[in-house]
């Protein structure tokens, strides 16, 4: 009986020992698996963290770029608005000047038609203001508007230095607008109406240059020789330039 009990106890110990060993092995396997899983999860979390950081950085840069673009666009809009407003004010001022000049011309025409001997005096300060505005338009390259302003001045003043200058700039507007034949007609008209003007030197040199551009050497030479024959041009820059061209480029 004791022997059986001893054998039973021994078998129980062996079973318990075996179970304990299996349990420990299983526990170790579960622990290893858990650690592996945790390591894998941590790696994925680190990877996701990097992606999130990258997205945050990209978003920050994109937002900054959008903000900069919006600021620049806003500045351009404000600048364009200021320019448009200034331009509208200038156009309104010029229209007032032109309308005033038209009214004065109408008075002159009616007075002449009625045979009135009363002298109609135009407002020179207004004509000068229109002249300055037209010069400003010319310098900005708005040749059509500038031409109309100079034409109004010329038709209103008719005589004197202001009319002479206006006629010259009418020709320049046509020339720079590419309307060379119209420019030639205006310049020739100036030479006929103001033969003693200092503008003769500049106009004849320009006509010579236009003939050169057209490949007409004979006409170029004729205008340069005419310039050299104008008494008022002897001390002008155009005189020396014309002499140099005839001496060096247009030798017989």
Image: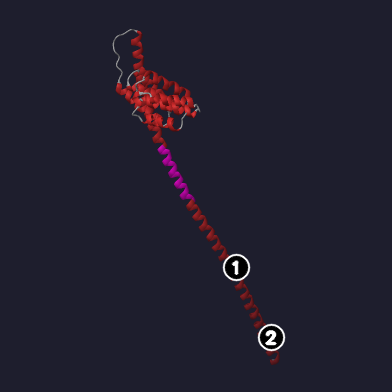
Is 89 placed above or below 153 here? below
Which span of residues is magenta-colored?
62-79
Dividing the picture into quadrants, the one containing residue 123 is top left
| 21 lies left or right of 189 | right
Image point 68% across, 90% down: which residue? Answer: 6
Q: Is residue 161 left or right of residue 27?
A: left
Position of residue 36 relative to residue 241, above or below, is: below
52 is within the stretch colored magenta: no
According to the image, label 2 marks what residue?
11
Question: What residue did someone put label 1 on?
Answer: 37
Residue furthest toward the front?
Answer: 252
* 186 up-or-down from 40: above or below: above
**Dominant SS in magenta:** helix
Furthest-bottom residue in this view: 2
Disc 2, SS? helix
Quadrant in the rendering for residue 108: top left
Q: Position of residue 127 (x, y in %)?
A: 33, 22
Q: Is residue 145 visible?
A: no
Give how far across and how far down residue 152 sits, in percent. Answer: 38, 20
Numbered disc total: 2
């Amino acid at each position: 009986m004791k022997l059986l009990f001893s054998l039973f106890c021994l078998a129980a110990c062996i079973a318990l020992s075996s179970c304990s060993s299996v349990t420990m092995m299983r526990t170790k396997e579960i622990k290893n698996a858990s650690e592996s899983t945790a390591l894998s999860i941590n790696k994925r979390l680190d990877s996701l963290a990097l992606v999130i950081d990258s997205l945050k950085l990209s978003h920050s840069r994109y937002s900054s770029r959008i903000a900069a673009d919006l600021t620049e666009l806003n500045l351009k809009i404000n600048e364009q608005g200021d320019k448009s407003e200034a331009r509208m004010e200038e156009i309104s001022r010029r229209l007032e000047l032109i309308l005033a000049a038209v009214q004065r011309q109408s008075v002159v025409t009616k007075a002449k038609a009625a045979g009135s001997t009363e002298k109609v005096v135009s407002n020179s300060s207004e004509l000068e203001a229109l002249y300055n505005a037209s010069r400003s338009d010319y310098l900005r390259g708005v040749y059509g508007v500038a031409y109309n302003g100079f034409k109004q001045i010329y038709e209103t003043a008719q005589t004197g230095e202001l009319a002479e200058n206006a006629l010259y700039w009418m020709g320049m507007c046509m020339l720079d607008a590419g309307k060379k034949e119209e420019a030639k007609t205006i310049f020739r008209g100036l030479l006929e109406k103001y033969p003693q003007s200092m503008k003769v030197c500049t106009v004849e040199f320009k006509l010579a240059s236009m003939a050169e551009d057209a490949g007409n050497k004979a006409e170029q030479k004729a205008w340069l020789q005419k310039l050299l024959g104008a008494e008022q041009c002897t001390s002008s820059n155009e005189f020396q330039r014309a002499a140099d061209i005839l001496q060096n480029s247009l030798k017989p």
